Image (cartoon, helix red, strand yellow):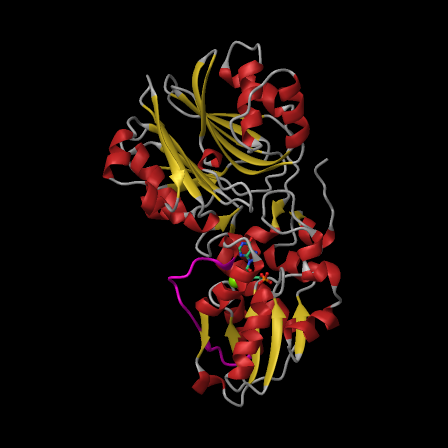
Amino acid sequence: MCAIVGVFGSVNASRIAYYSLFAMQHRGQEATGISCSDGHKISKVKKKGLVTEVFDEEALNHLKGDMAIGHNRYSTAGSKSVIDAQPIYANYKLGEISVAHNGNLINGKEVKDMLIDEGAIFQSDMDTENIIHLIARSHKEHLKDRIIEALGVIKGAYCLVIQGRNKIFAIRDKYGVRPFSLGQLEDGGYIVSSETCAFDLVGAKFIRDVRPGEMIIFDKSKEKYESIQLFEPEPRICAFEYIYFARPDSVIDGKSVYAVRQEMGKAMAKQDPIDADLVIPVPDSGVSAALGYAKQSGIPFEMGIVRNHYVGRTFIEPTQAKRDMKVKLKLSPISSLLKGKRIVVIDDSLVRGTTAKRIINILKDAGASEVHMCITSPTIKHPCRYGIDTPSYDELISANMSIEEIRDYIGADSLSFLSINALKKSIGDDREYSLVSFDGNYFIN
Ligand code: 5GP
Ligand code: MG
């Protein structure tokens, strides 16, 4: 979760950051912020709310300069105060600094305790604040070396944009767990962002992905950006970015998210062929995969369930009761299509089982004679600790029930999940992925 963006050397820096954050609103809806430097001073705006709610003309005019960084926040229940919005800004020995982070640090608590023990005062609950403290305490002369020192202490999944008065640093952890891409703007400036869908909106040309373990430095006094390979890369992009999180029009590490989702649907049809009359997606998350399933199986595709777009994502509400209601508000069936039909319904993932149970209820109520639920990802048995908001073991239905028990609980005639192998093949067999939610292999330690 979360989106970050950095814009360097553009007269429209704050506006480009704003549009980029708008394009990446799906990665976090809780709070948003931009900080912008004109070479002398960093100005900043951050607040709870959506990008379009937080930034108006006045805010964008206040953000002066040609270097901006920005952030959309997606947080778990309990840390919803405005103080937990990013970028995080501070004044330290070398002057002003602003940091935005996508990912999750696994030793955040230990580092924080160590810092507090040594007298640090924390303003927020965010593990990102550790990074600022580590930079501020370093005795190195240059910001770059201070950052490198801080990166030697933190562990976990991170993409970072760090802004000084005249520079922006873009850093991706050595596993490249979260996506991060580099592009060039029409006016010659540069952009880095969590997803390439931001480039399309602001008219930037994709250059390449930020490499796992790489630091890119944009510096006013240099003509071109500088690249430093800080850590030996061990690429393991998060499979869940392809399954659910990223927008289908983004390209992550060379693979189109839309195409990968279609492959997952095709693989599902090959893995578990079903005799049925219609394939329908759970909108919107199941659409691309359902198209793939329909193509592979030859079963007609229909939008049998309509989504009300004025309801936010189900996960925004942190309590279970509110979540149930939201699913109802969000989805309704086209009964004339469904009556008497054998339906294959496709969704991208099953977390708590709330959506699937409700969907099957809706379809049966609408007169479907059989409902076969196909989930185009494997069973989620472990919480992700690298930046996806999966709940703890006791809430993960697949960690507590067998597939047959889940089938019974959600009321489906059959239930299938894509195998881990088929998932890997659908994205591309040529590399490793972060699959922690599925296989429990917490490889960062
Ligand atoms: P469940 O209803 O089983 O708890 O969750 C499954 C549904 O939530 C699927 O429709 C899937 O698209 C969606 N989903 C999966 N992961 C996430 C997430 O990290 N955030 C949000 N907002 N939705 C998710
Ligand atoms: Mg969904």
Count every numbered label the image shows and give the total: 0
**Relative vertical location of residue 373 with respect to residue 367 in this rendering, above or below:** above
Q: Looking at the picture, how far across and down is residue 215, in whole percent?
A: 53, 28
- Left or right: 410, with 25 as reference point: right
**Horizontal and vertical percent position of residue 386:** 62, 42
In the orientation shown, which residue stands out farthest toward the front?
321
Q: Is residue 311 magenta?
A: yes
Instruction: Check residue 273 for magenta coloring.
Output: no
Quadrant assignment for the C terminus: top right
Decide which of 282, 174 is in the foreground and name it.
282
- Name the residue rendered at 41%, 22% in the picture: 167
Front in this rendered view, residue 395 or 68:
395
Q: Main secondary structure of the magenta part?
A: loop
Question: Is residue 23 in sight in this rendering?
Answer: yes
Q: Name the residue at 55% across, 25% down.
A: 122
For image coordinates 60% across by 71% down, the residue present is 357
Place of residue 223 in the rendered image (x, y in percent of width and height, measured from the top left)? 37, 22
Left or right of 410: which side holds 144?
left
> Can you give x and y, in whole percent of width and height, for residue 347 in the image?
56, 67
345 vs 195: above or below: below
**Left or right: 286 with respect to 192?**
right
Start-end of magenta stretch: 298-314
